[in-house]
Image (cartoon, rainbow, N blue to C red):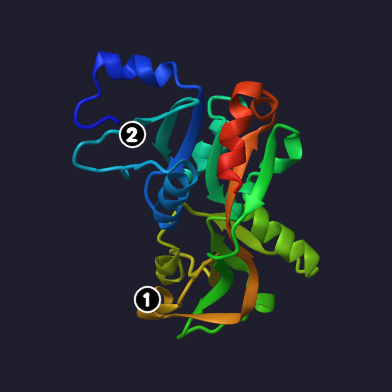
Amino acid sequence: MLQGTCKQADLKRLRKAVFRIGIQKDGVLTEMSVAHVEKSFNKKCPKYDRNNKILSLVIATDKGNISVHYMRNLDLGVMVRKGFLDAAIIGTDILEEYELENNNVVSKIFTSVDEAWPLYYMMPTDKEVEFKEARIIATPYPVITKHILEKKNIKNVEIVNIAGSSELMPLLTTKEGRSIDGVIDISVSGKSAEANGLIRSGRAFRKFHPVLITNCLSMSEENKKCFFKKLCK
C-alpha cells in the first residue's frame, strides 16, 4: 500500500493494476465504501488522508493488484463512463442527476438500502412558501428538480443551480427584492436546516442510496470478473 509520497515504483504499480475502483474522497459515502472494499477483498484499505494527500493506493491480491482512487463523487461517474475506472461506489443521486445509466456504458450492479439520504423541499421559517407556490427554487440537483416539477405539473418555476450551502440561499435577496422561496436538497436529520432557519415541507421526494456502478466493457473482461464477483457478494 502507498503511504507518504507517491514514488516512481508506486506509480508503476498503479498503472499496472488489473482492476481500478473509485471511492468518494470526502462525504457520507467514504466510510461505507472503504468498509465494503475491505470486506470484499479481506484487505486493509486506508482512507484518504488530507495530511499525506495520497489519492491513490494499491491493494495486492492473489488475482493481481487493485488500484483504489479517491475522487469527487461526480468525477467517479465520469471516469467509469469513460473507462478510466472499472467500477466506483457513488450515490444514486449522481446516477439520476447526470443520467449515467442511460448511455449503455455504465451499469448499476447492486444497491445498498442500509444507507439512505432523503431529498426534501425546505423553506425559511419567516417566509413559508410551500412547494406548489414556490417560484424560485435553489438546488444542487436541477435535473431532478425539473423532473419533480414536471411530474407534479408545476410550471413557471425558476431553478437556480447551486453547488452547496443550500441553507443560506433563502437569506439572499437581489436589489429588486427577489428572493429564493426554498431549496431542494438532501436533508438526513433536518438539524442543519433548522439551525439555519429552514423547515422541511412535506414528505421526501425520493431517497438516494449507495450504488456500485461499473463500466460495461470492463465487466466482460475475463481477468476482471473475479473482482466484480467479490464486490457483489
* Residue at the image point whose x is 47% and y is 37% from the top: 22
Residue 61 vs residue 36, the one in the foreground:
61
Q: Is mark 1 on a helix, strand or loop?
A: loop
Left/right of residue 173 with respect to residue 110 in the rendered view:
left
Count the marks: 2
Left/right of residue 212 with respect to residue 126 in the rendered view:
right
Q: Is mark 2 on a helix, strand or loop?
A: loop
* Residue at the image point whose x is 37% and y is 18% from the top: 13
Left/right of residue 104 with respect to residue 1 in the rendered view:
right
Q: Mark 2 vs mark 1: which is more N-terminal?
A: 2
Vertical comparison of 217 with 191: above or below: above
For the N terminus, the quadrant is top left
Type of the residue with mark 1: Asn
Residue 150 vs residue 230, the one in the foreground:
230
Residue 173 vs residue 231, the one in the foreground:
231
Q: Position of residue 47 (x, y in %)?
A: 32, 45
Marks 2, 1: nearer the viewer: 2
Vertical comparison of 18 with 169: above or below: above
Q: Where is residue 92 in the image (x, y as percent from the top left)?
A: 61, 53
Q: Where is residue 223 in the image (x, y as percent from the top left)?
A: 60, 22
**Circle 1 crowding by C-alpha within 10 Å: few under 14, some 14–19, many from 20:** some
How many angstroms separate mark 2 from mark 1 (CA)? 33 Å
**Circle 2 crowding by C-alpha within 10 Å: few under 14, some 14–19, many from 20:** some
Vertical comparison of 233 with 158: above or below: above
Is residue 81 among the parts visible in the rendering? no
Residue highlighted by disc 2: 55
Type of the residue with mark 2: Leu
* Residue at the image point whose x is 69% and y is 25% from the top: 217
Residue highlighted by disc 1: 196
Is residue 15 among the parts visible in the rendering? yes
